[in-house]
């Protein structure tokens, strides 16, 4: 069970990074996210 949860969290983390990474700086700014914040936002996505 823990392995499945870990894999799903990793997959969600990578998907979030990929999706945010494809956005323009303008789109990220509109969301209140800086390009340097992408990894933090991805970590927050799996935490809550």
Image (cartoon, rainbow, N blue to C red):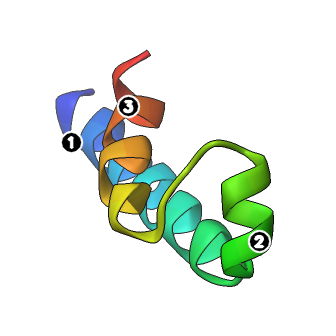
**Residue on which disc 1 sits:** 3
**Secondary structure under the numbered disc 3 in the rendered image:** helix
Give the CA distance from mark 1 to mark 3: 20 Å
Q: Secondary structure at mark 2?
A: helix
Rendered view: 15 above or below 42 = below
8 relative to 26, above or below: above
| Along the viewing direction, whichever of 14 and 39 lies nearer the viewer | 39
Q: Toward the viewer: 40 or 18? A: 40
- Residue 36 percent across, percent down from the top left: 34, 66
Q: Given this view, does label 1 or label 3 mark the residue nearer the observer?
A: 3
* Residue 19 vertical placement versus 11 (above, below): below
Relative to residue 31, is residue 13 drawn left or right? left
| Label 1 element class | helix
Mark positioned earlier in the residue sequence (1 or 2): 1
Pointer 1: residues within 10 angstroms few (<14), some, or many (20+)?
few
Q: Which residue in the protein does label 2 denote? A: 26
Quarter of the image with the C terminus in it = top left
At which x and y percent is residue 22? 69, 84
Q: Position of residue 20 (x, y in %)?
A: 62, 67
Residue lying at 67% horizontally and 70% vertically, measured from the top left: 19
Pick whichever of labels 2 and 3 is earlier in the sequence: 2
Q: CA distance from mark 2 to mark 3?
A: 21 Å
Q: Which residue is mark 3?
A: 44
Which is more foreground, mark 2 or mark 3?
A: 2
């Amino acid at each position: 069970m823990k392995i499945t949860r870990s894999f799903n969290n990793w997959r969600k983390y990578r998907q979030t990074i990929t999706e945010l990474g494809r956005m323009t700086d303008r789109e990220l700014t509109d969301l209140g996210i800086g390009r340097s914040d992408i990894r933090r936002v991805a970590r927050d996505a799996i935490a809550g």
